[in-house]
Image: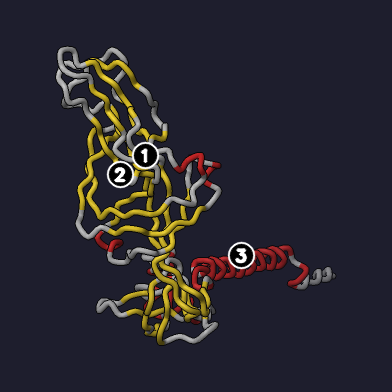
Amino acid sequence: MSLPKPKKKQFYKRWWFWTLLVLGTIIVVAVVAGLSAYQESQREAYAYLEETVSVEKRVLNKTISTDGEITPEQHTQLYTSLPNSKITEVNVTVGDEVTVGDVLIKTDGGPAPDEEIEAPFDGRVLAVHTFVGDVPSLAIPVIEIGYRTNHIEFLASESEVIDLNEGQHVTITIPSYENGDDEYDGKVTFVDVQKQTIASSAASGAVAESGYVIHVNADDLPEAVRNIIGISVDVVVDIYETESVLSIEPSAIQYDDNDEAFVYIPPVVDDTFIAEATVAEDVTDVLQQKEVEVGFKGDEYYEITDGLRDNENVLLYIPSNSGAGGLF
């Protein structure tokens, strides 16, 4: 008599089936997740292609920003004229206003006649270099005065002076006064046509600056600082302003080897684009370009005279190293 053979387990009831199924599922999930992560990383690598700027009509401005200082309209040094004369009176201090003919300093000439040094014009005392009892050298000034009216003076470069003219509006701020928060109005009153070299002192020693001397009226400055000679100010000169013109940010404008201007059109960053860009030597190889003509160049925006429409979007920038999707 033979015993009946046990029935074979169906495959889906065997342990190895479920083991293989679980392992296979894990592998598939891992592959899908990895592929999804890779695609997401690729899209992130091209995220800069979603940064665009709009072509819009704007009023464009061009300015010159620089620093200057308050300077007297005229600076005169006064000397004693008699050798070995002794100072007997000093009637003024720095900052005093004087009137033409006022006696500023008296001297005892000894065997020679005494001397009185008078103000040659209505002005303000800028410096006093002597004291009672002093016997000053004839080569050293004893007092310096300047006109009561002062101006702001700065040096313009060769490229700046071309755009500067008398009468241009100037916005003035004073960093050391009220934290520089207030603005004051002025205008250009003098534009030199001869380059000057002006020596000044610095912590590292004497330095010389070259440029064209520009004067700006300082009538709008507060009384507290208007007559402080040498105080530093920041100036912004309004050079030119356009009417409303079509314009974009300068960073969106590219230039080819022939210095012709163009912009990049924003692409659709999908799988097809990513595949093409990844194998390209540079992402710009798969981007569409559009030639443009640039007109007036303002401080913040450049005028576009041809090639773009109002409200059209263009790419803001392309990294200098954009090969292989910018990943390397």
Between 77 and 26, the one lying in front of the other is: 77
In this rendering, position of residue 200 left or right of residue 111: right
Residue highlighted by disc 1:
123
Dot 1: element: strand
Q: Quadrant of residue 202?
A: top left
Q: CA distance from mark 2 to mark 1?
A: 9 Å
Q: Quadrant of residue 80?
A: top left
Between 113 and 122, the one lying in front of the other is: 113
**Vertical order, 297 against 178 (above or below):** below
Residue 240 appears in view: yes
**Vertical order, 142 against 72 (above or below):** above
Q: Earlier in the sequence, mark 1 or mark 3?
A: 3
Q: Earlier in the sequence, mark 2 or mark 1?
A: 2
Residue 194 x %, y %? 19, 57
**Vertical order, 319 against 185 (above or below):** below
**Residue at (72% x, 66% y) in the render:** 18
* Total marks placed: 3
Quarter of the C terminus within the rendering? bottom left
Residue 301 x %, y %? 45, 71
- For marks 2 and 3, give the one nearer the viewer: 2
**Vertical order, 140 against 270 (above or below):** above
Amino acid residing under circle 2 = Gln
Q: CA distance from mark 1 to mark 3?
A: 87 Å
Between 48 and 120, the one lying in front of the other is: 120
Q: CA distance from mark 2 to mark 3?
A: 83 Å
Amino acid residing under circle 3 = Ala
Residue highlighted by disc 3:
30
Residue 13 x %, y %? 78, 68
